[in-house]
Image (spheres, rainbow, N blue to C red):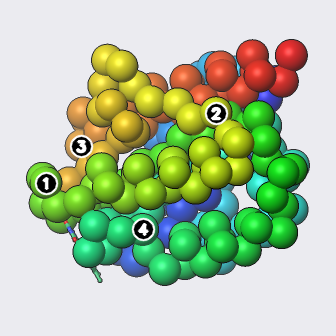
């Protein structure tokens, strides 16, 4: 059973709700899901997981500073996250408000770590986005991402 760590930052709860839907997807695929606020997550947690999914609100088209801080701290694990499965999601206020650029920023950092990132061919392509709190559509895409990263993590761990 692959372990998938879901890390999020939130101020008003929307991204946390997305994280809980991603968790359901990981579990539906038979994965062991751990959800942590970024303030509770350590770089050792990153190393321990088979898959890592990171969610952030969209702040001026960028991830929240707290998420960027974790990414910067993860340099201490450079080389040790290689081959893990990755994915990302974001909540924003507006359609076209920069949620995809937030996801891509997180996925870029994962690629620099040598991680294998997952998108959704029949869904939000780079990762789930939600306008405000997740509606049914966003919930479905969050679950899909969780399932897909859990399955990828299982294959990569073989
Ligand atoms: C400092 C700040 C910057 C923001 N920048 C954007 C933005 O560039 N585009 C956008 O669509 N929403 C922006 N928002 C809105 C948030 O992304 C949105 O409310 C999101 O759902 C908040 O997620 P949370 O409930 O997990 O905190 C911004 C909000 C704040 C506080």
Quickly name the residue at label 3: 135
Specify the label residue 63 is tagged with.
4
User: Residue 27: x, y in percent?
Assistant: 64, 29
Image mark count: 4
Q: Position of residue 114 (x, y in %)?
A: 70, 42
| Pointer 4 residue Cβ closer than 8 Å to ligand 1 | no
Residue nearest the observer in this picture, 58 or 16: 58
Q: Quadrant of ligand 1?
A: bottom left
Does the closest atom of ligand 1 sit within 8 Å of the Cβ of label 1? Answer: yes
> Sequence-wise, which precedes: disc 3 or disc 1?
1
Give whichever of discs 1 and 4 has the lower sequence position.
4
Tell us which disc is closer to us: 2 or 4.
2
- Left-right relation of 95 to 123: left
Q: Is residue 120 visible?
A: yes
Q: Nearer the viewer, mark 2 or mark 1?
A: 2
Name the N-terminal-most of marks 2 and 3: 2
The residue under label 2 is 116
- Residue appearing at x 12%, y 53% in the figure: 95
Q: From mark 2 to mark 1, how far is it between C-alphas? A: 26 Å
- Asked if disc 2 and disc 1 are in contact, CB closer than 8 Å, the reply is no
Q: Which callout, 2 or 1, points at the residue further toward the start of the chain?
A: 1
Alpha carbon separation for disc pair 3 and 1: 17 Å
Q: Secondary structure at mark 3?
A: loop
Between marks 4 and 3 in the image, the one whose residue lies nearer the viewer: 4
* Nearer to the camera, 54 or 113: 113
**CB atoms at circles 4 and 3 under 8 Å apart?**
no
Q: Secondary structure at mark 2?
A: strand
**Is 114 placed above or below 19 here?**
above
Tell me where residue 72 appears, x and y as whole percent.
Answer: 66, 73
Kindly identify the residue that appears in the image at 24 percent across and 43 percent down. 135
The x, y position of residue 57, in whole percent, is: 36, 66
């Amino acid at each position: 059973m692959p372990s998938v760590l879901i890390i999020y930052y939130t101020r008003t709860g929307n991204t946390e709700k997305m994280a809980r839907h991603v968790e359901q997807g990981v579990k539906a695929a038979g994965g062991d899901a751990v959800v942590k606020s970024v303030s509770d997550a350590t770089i050792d947690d990153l190393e321990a997981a088979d898959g890592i999914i990171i969610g952030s609100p969209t702040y001026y088209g960028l991830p929240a500073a707290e998420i960027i801080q974790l990414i910067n701290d993860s340099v201490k694990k450079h080389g040790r996250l290689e081959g893990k499965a990755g994915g990302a999601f974001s909540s924003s206020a507006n359609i076209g408000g920069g949620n995809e650029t937030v996801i891509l920023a997180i996925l870029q950092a994962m690629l620099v770590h040598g991680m294998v990132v997952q998108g959704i061919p029949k869904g939000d392509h780079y990762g789930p986005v939600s306008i405000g709190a997740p509606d049914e559509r966003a919930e479905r895409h969050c679950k899909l991402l969780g399932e897909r990263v859990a399955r990828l993590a299982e294959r990569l761990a073989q």
